Image (cartoon, helix red, strand yellow):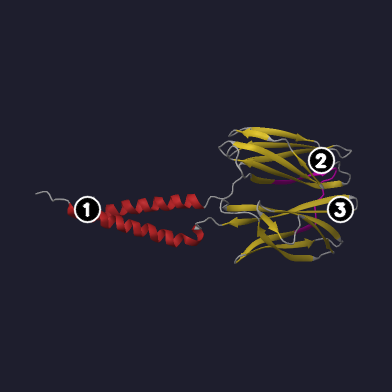
Amino acid sequence: MNTRQQIRKYFSIGFLLLLFALSAVTASAEDRLNVTTETQVSLSGKVHITLHLKNISGHPLYSIHPMFHFHHSMEMGNRIEQMQPGESVTIDNDRHPPVVLSGRYPLVVLLHYQTEPKQKESILQTYTGSFHHKEPVESVVGGNMEFVQEGEISKLKIHLNNQSNSLKNVRLMLILPPGLQADKFPGMMTFTLHGGENVYFETGVQHTQSFRSLTGYYPIHLLLEYGEFLKHYTSEIQSSVYFNPIFDLHQHWPHLIAMILFATGLALVYKRRISNLQPKSI
């Protein structure tokens, strides 16, 4: 094997190592359950919700415990002991408080589960959706939000916009990933927005537990509700937060490439020295 072939061989090995590092440290927070809901609302306002779960992780899941967050209330669902890969489960719930106003209502399902039997900490997956009663109205209050990291300080920047000419009393509910808590946002709060008004505010975000095991993107949900002219409206603002892995490839990829090239060079030098030490055939 000549020198050029050796260089190609060791560079190929280094490239494969780089691809392995890419796949190892850029894995994001993926949902292990496929979640869908079907909602039926009678003319009298009685709500029946069907929750469909499917294990799409490729591994068994344990102690799956759904919790429904309804309009102004919460309800625990039945716990599922175990779900095999590809297995589907259907859960029916008719404990949603009757709805009176026509319009659209939010529906949130918090799913706690474990990837190992008797695991100490559960994984949380959040599903958000909505359903309507009599009339599928559309909200005119929207906005956006952004999670920013300024040194050691984490902030959530929120913008609300009333796109109508009338006043709105909007109730907000913030759903953060597990282990995060907003300083100035005690779960729910109310804002009064005048016609055409834009509101900007920030809230600090604190860690309530270790995040060494969490890497990738995690969703953030802000639910908005208000009533007007005997109708109920809801909308949702979504964003995400990124947790850096212990070794952040986005920050250290030049060092990783340099290390691979250095290791390739050392391998070539070692190979040549071994070849020189071998007795030459006469």
What residue appears at the point 74 percent right and 62 percent down from the top-left corner?
A: 184
Which label is found at residue 96?
2
Residue 82 locus on image (x, y percent):
63, 33
Closer to the chain start, of discs 1 and 2, is 2
- Which is more foreground, mark 1 or mark 3? 1
Closer to the chain start, of discs 3 and 2, is 2
Residue type of the residue flagged with mark 1: Ile
Residue 239 locus on image (x, y percent):
67, 56
- Which is more foreground, mark 3 or mark 2? 2
What residue appears at the point 63 percent right and 52 percent down from the top-left corner?
A: 218
Work out how far the residue at label 1 is from the one at label 3, CA to CA, in angstroms. Answer: 81 Å
Residue 183 locus on image (x, y percent):
72, 61
Work out how far the residue at label 1 is from the one at label 2, CA to CA, in angstroms. Answer: 76 Å
Secondary structure beneath label 3: strand
Residue type of the residue flagged with mark 3: Gly
Closer to the camera in the image, 99 or 114: 114
Residue 131 lies, with reference to residue 180, above or below; the image says above
What residue appears at the point 52 percent right and 52 percent down from the top-left corner?
A: 26
Secondary structure beneath label 1: helix
Q: Which residue is disc 1 drawn over?
A: 274
The part of the chain drawn in magenta is 127-142
Closer to the chain start, of discs 1 and 3, is 3
Work out how far the residue at label 3 is from the one at label 2, CA to CA, in angstroms. Answer: 19 Å
Secondary structure beneath label 2: loop
Q: Is residue 86 magenta?
A: no
Q: Which residue is disc 3 drawn over?
A: 227
Q: Is residue 71 visible?
A: no
